[in-house]
């Protein structure tokens, strides 16, 4: 194979990886996916465009993901809001792969090097699981990586325009999830500044400083605007409090387990390519260096610096470092490119095996999910058959409750979404996991996996239930 040539197999692997996201759009609810489907429907129903609410209460997160979901939900219909949300996250992962390809090329890498980086990324956990879940992380990863990559491209090309683009992206990332987007970008900026003295004049140009000021001012402007709505002015405090809470250890043993396991888990999320590269490097099969070796080191250091807080955080989760996945793929691909051709072929075959494994998983996953966690859509249908369009409350914040309630909201549209139970509930229906609430009667009992759920009635709702029973 000629240097720089892209084999046909690599192109077909990309097609297969992208196509593999389609079936996952139609899987049942997983984990806490109900958060964004429900906040989107509540935003739509209540016309609360700037302040997401969950169960009628301020959610404490910005609305950018909801804004992107809404056009798809409005087009597909409320019954398919989960498909709409996963469509956004799957597209975000695909665009992250495309951005990684463009990033490698912008740094001077060959098309072959860019293809290797793309394939390594699409053989990671981003393809198999976290890249299609209806969480904010895939979109946050796309925007945050785009901002970090733009800083590096600005330094490489000695131009300020990418810095302005980086500030737009980091603002959008903040509006997607949290202020931590700025921490990722600041860490990358610091590494670039220290490692590339020739780029310092570009990074400190007056126009670049103006971009930084605008980017930093954006969250303050957002908090000011949202505080004037009277609904979610505490958003900044909620974000900061959530981050600080995750930095506090529940106990020393849990923290030590996190410190030991987190790097190992990260390595495993890129298996088997990470193992192939490690084996090749340890066996001394590396020869020469890639065209982007200096920038690979920069990316590795930026990834390591940004990795540290999540590694040392007692409550860190692997999905929190999704913005670093493209950098990790870039570094692994750079090392892979210096190994012999046989090792590269083995790595590509491993990528093919991972993609093939995903297609097998696509057939098995919905069956396993339903057997282990139950059929939330069927449970919701049973409840809607009893309550109709009447007001429903809940006191269940669990992921099981989110899955059932998300289905209820979409099945009952345009009826009012489920809200949190008031302290003095007089009339209505309550979906709960506790059957002995004073002043209520049990109307329905069901199981969702291992979770027992109850539908209680109160006041006039009990009279309606008695009429339906007859």
Image (tube, helix red, strand yellow):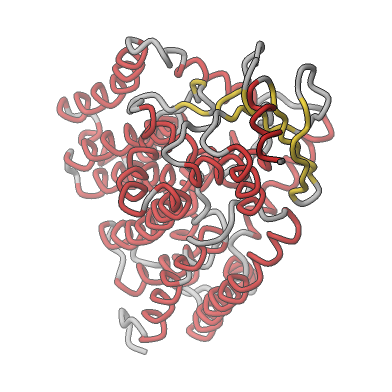
Q: Residue sitting at 60 percent across and 21 percent down? A: 244
Residue 327 in sight = no
Nearest to the observer: residue 249 or residue 49 = 49
308 left or right of 41 in image: right
Image height of 463 relative to 256, above or below: above
Nearest to the observer: residue 54 or residue 19 = 54
268 left or right of 452 in image: left
Residue 124: x and y in percent read 54, 62
Quadrant including the C terminus = top right
Where residue 118 sits, quadrant-wise, is bottom left
Q: Residue sitting at 33 percent across and 61 percent down? A: 98
Q: Residue furthest bottom?
A: 1
Where residue 14 sits, quadrant-wise, is bottom left
Residue 280: x and y in percent read 60, 73
Residue 65: x and y in percent read 39, 40
Quadrant including the N terminus = bottom left
Residue 401 in sight = yes
Nearest to the observer: residue 193 or residue 450 = 450
Residue 384: x and y in percent read 59, 43
Nearest to the observer: residue 146 or residue 393 = 393
Q: How many marks?
A: 0
195 left or right of 208 in image: right
């Amino acid at each position: 194979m000629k240097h720089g040539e892209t084999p046909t197999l690599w192109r077909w692997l990309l097609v297969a990886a992208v196509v593999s996201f389609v079936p996952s759009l139609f899987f049942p609810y997983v984990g806490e996916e109900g958060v964004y489907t429900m906040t989107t429907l509540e935003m739509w129903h209540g016309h609360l465009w700037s302040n997401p609410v969950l169960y009628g209460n301020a959610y404490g997160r910005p609305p950018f993901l909801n804004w992107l979901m809404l056009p798809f939900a409005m087009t597909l219909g409320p019954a398919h809001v989960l498909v709409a949300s996963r469509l956004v996250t799957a597209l975000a992962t695909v665009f992250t792969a495309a951005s990684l390809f463009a990033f490698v090329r912008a740094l001077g890498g060959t098309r072959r090097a860019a293809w290797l980086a793309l394939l390594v990324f699409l053989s990671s956990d981003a393809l198999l699981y976290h890249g299609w879940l209806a969480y904010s992380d895939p979109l946050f990863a796309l925007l945050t990586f785009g901002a970090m990559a733009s800083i590096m491209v600005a330094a490489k090309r000695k131009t300020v325009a990418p810095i302005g683009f980086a500030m737009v992206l980091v603002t959008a990332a903040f509006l997607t999830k949290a202020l931590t987007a700025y921490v990722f970008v600041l860490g990358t900026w610091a590494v670039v500044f220290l490692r590339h003295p020739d780029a310092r004049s570009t990074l400190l140009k007056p126009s670049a400083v103006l971009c930084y000021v605008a980017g930093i001012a954006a969250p303050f402007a957002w908090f000011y605007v949202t505080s004037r709505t009277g609904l979610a002015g505490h958003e900044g405090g909620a974000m900061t409090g959530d981050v600080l809470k995750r930095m506090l250890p529940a106990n020393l043993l849990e923290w030590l387990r996190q410190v030991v396991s987190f790097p190992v888990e990260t390595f495993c999320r890129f298996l088997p390519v990470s193992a192939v590269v490690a084996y090749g490097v340890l066996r001394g099969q590396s020869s020469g260096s890639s065209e982007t070796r200096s920038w690979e080191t920069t990316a590795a250091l930026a990834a390591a610096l940004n990795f540290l807080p999540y590694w040392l955080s007692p409550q860190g989760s692997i999905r929190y470092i999704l913005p670093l996945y493209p950098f990790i793929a870039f570094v692994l691909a750079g090392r892979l490119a210096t190994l012999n051709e046989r090792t590269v072929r083995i790595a590509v075959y491993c990528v093919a095996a991972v993609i093939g494994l995903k297609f097998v998983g696509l057939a098995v996953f919905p069956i396993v999910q339903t057997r282990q966690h139950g059929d939330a859509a069927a449970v919701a249908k049973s409840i809607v058959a009893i309550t109709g369009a009447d007001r429903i409350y809940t006191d269940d914040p669990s992921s099981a409750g989110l899955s059932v309630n998300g289905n209820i909201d979409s099945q009952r549209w345009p009826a009012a979404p489920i809200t949190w139970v008031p302290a003095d509930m007089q009339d209505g229906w309550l979906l709960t996991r506790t059957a002995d609430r004073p002043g209520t009667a049990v109307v329905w009992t069901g199981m969702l996996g291992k979770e027992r759920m109850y539908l209680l009635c109160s006041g006039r709702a009990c009279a309606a239930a008695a009429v339906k029973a007859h």
